[in-house]
Amino acid sequence: MSETKKYTFKDFKSDQEVRWCPGCGDIAIMSSIQKAMAEMGIPKEDFAIVSGIGCSSRFPYYMNTYGFHGIHGRAGAIASGVKTANPKLSVWQITGDGDALAIGGNHFIHEIRRNIDLNVVLFNNQIYGLTKGQYSPTSEYGIKTKTSPYGTVEKPFNPGELVIGAGGTFFARGIDNNVKENQELFMEVEKHKGISIVEVLQNCVIFNDGVYSYLTDRKEKADRQLFVEHGKPMIFGKEKDKGLVLENGKLKVVKIGENGITEADILVHDAKEQSPIMHYQLAALQYPEFPIVLGVIRAVELTTYDEAVHAQIEEVKASSKIKCMDDLLHSGSTWEVE
């Protein structure tokens, strides 16, 4: 067999003009994915990108790979079919908080439940950007938008809680402008066998600008972001002197060096723990009481839907009397017409 061609991120750029707004977080996310794909050792023709409707769903046009631009909320259904029919492909579903969690919500939870081997990148800007600024399922409570002029009265979804609650085997979170960290995240996404969901906190410069500024502020982000890594203590802060401990079954922020707390007291992240309880708590943490958790929060191995489907097909074929189309056409009740 010939060796896989060596790629650069430029090999994954299409000849189409990028039509996202200048400064849009989507551009940084795409750059991270292109750089990651170039390092995966996968032939370019084995990538397939599926999207629904929304700003993020223009993604397939800008990638020099196979792609399918679907309809609103149905990217999950299309991607599921593509992967099940073509198990060797690396299938990436590009979606947004409206596309995946509103009209596509049912498809979203069932592709997670089935554990189909898909790579799902959820762009979360907490707004409908393409249709000009209506509130979405992740918009903050009370936000004033085109469709909530007096403020929303709905509690928003937390995508991490939703994914883990639906039985997700992999959940990670990133921020659009953390290009290097996101590149590493997407490499982990490809390695995972099963449904991989990455929520990327993404800024919409037109309709929800600055929604994550409390996290991305250069002076404060070290104290407000906790990047977790499997097997390492959950420590954060400008001086690396803060961490998480478990007290009475709940997570708590402590400072190393105060009240007898040492680094040995800080919880060590176990992304591979089968029980989702700790992963759920980490995904649910909210600022300002806690830092926002980034990185791979959950990564456990279970049989995938596509593996089970193809194993069942082989099992049925082995015991079936029907081996070809002629066998099928001459089986059951047949007649000879004179």
Image: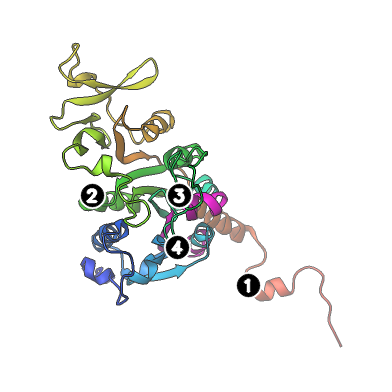
Pointer 3 residue: 145
Q: Distance between the residues labelled 4 and 2?
A: 23 Å
- Mark closer to the chain start, 2 or 1: 2
Give the quadrant of the N terminus: bottom left
Pointer 2 residue: 178
Res 116 visible? no
What span is in magenta?
80-107
Question: CB of mark 2 within 8 Å of CB of mark 1?
Answer: no
Secondary structure state at the residue bearing disc 3: loop
Q: Residue 324's mark?
A: 1
Instruction: Please state which amino acid type lies under the numbered disc 1.
Output: Cys
Residue 329 sits in quarter: bottom right
Depicted 120 relative to depicted 20: above or below: above
Instruction: Please state which amino acid type lies under the numbered disc 2.
Output: Asn
* Dot in front, 2 or 1: 2
Q: Position of residue 284 (x, y in %)?
A: 40, 33
In the current view of this chain or complex, which residue is farthest to the bottom? 338
Out of 50 and 3, give the one closest to the viewer. Answer: 50
* Dot in front, 1 or 4: 4
Pointer 4 residue: 51
Q: Distance between the residues labelled 1 and 3?
A: 59 Å
Give the quadrant of the C terminus: bottom right
* Dot in front, 3 or 2: 3
